[in-house]
Amino acid sequence: MKKLLFGILILVFASTLSIAQMRVGLVGGGQLASLPYKTPYYTFDGPNTLAFHAGLTADIAVSRHWSIRPQLLYSGKGGQYTLNGNPEIGPVVERSHKINYLEVPVQLAYSLKAGPGRALVGAGPYIGYALSGKDNIILDGQGSPTDIEFGSETNQTRRIDYGLRVSTGYDLTSGLGLSFFYARGLANIENSRSYISKNKVYGVSMHFLFGRR
């Protein structure tokens, strides 16, 4: 299943390379990720986790102002929160999740000429497949990370993540560009309906597209 999904994602991205008026390039950047944990009684959330993303990007011109922008990324996500921060009622318990995804966002972008380049906004869906992850439970300052188990059992984490992503940015005619984005997961990566964890990410990307539009 893992190899099959990898093949499908790569095939979808590669198939866009045959479309005319298209530029391809490299993209990378940093992001602040969070993974709120909701139970029937409480919602646990905490500071954002610093992560990064890197991979391939493309700009497929549909018209003068509209384009489709798919990407194939290695993307880090996760979050951290305190389960009990009051030592008077029990030991202090903290937890952090770090999950690495193979991710494919596809956005419809609208751009306008502005100065030496083009300003743009975009929105669209993304889908991700978890490659690996670490779970770290810290009890009174002591703890060690363990590998996250992926699967369909109650105590395991779902591999598939999907959601929506919006962005704004600026592209120079040289192909260099900068963008800011927000991605909101719609998939619950917990297997139990009583517990909900959905990814949230704020990020900044730099990219370079080969060729001129």
Image (cartoon, rainbow, N blue to C red):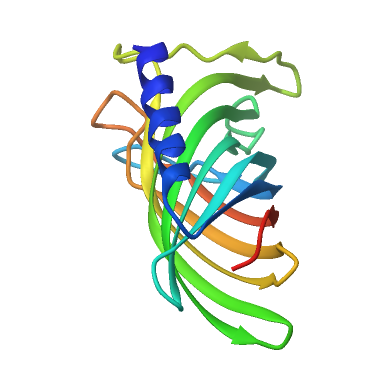
Q: Residue at x 69, y 54 (%)?
A: 207
Q: Residue at x 38, y 35 (%)?
A: 12
- Which residue is more in the foreground, 160 or 27? 27
Q: Quadrant of residue 195?
A: top left
- Which residue is more in the foreground, 172 or 170? 172
Q: Is residue 201 above or below residue 81?
A: below
Q: Is residue 97 above or below residue 209?
A: above
**Can you say which quadrant of the picture contains the N terminus?**
top left
Report the side of 68 relative to 93 (left or right): left
Q: Estimate the x, y position of residue 109 in percent, counting from the top left.
A: 45, 68
| Residue lying farthest to the bottom in this orientation | 115
Report the side of 145 relative to 164 (left or right): right
The answer to whether any part of residue 46 appears in the image is no
Number of marks in the rendered image = 0
Q: Estimate the x, y position of residue 136 in percent, counting from the top left.
A: 63, 21
- Which residue is more in the foreground, 65 or 170? 65
The answer to whether any part of residue 17 appears in the image is yes
Q: Residue at x 67, y 20 (%)?
A: 139
Q: Residue at x 26, y 32 (%)?
A: 194
Q: Estimate the x, y position of residue 15 in percent, counting from the top left.
A: 40, 38
**Can you say which quadrant of the picture contains the C terminus?**
bottom right
Q: Estimate the x, y position of residue 202 in percent, counting from the top left.
A: 59, 56
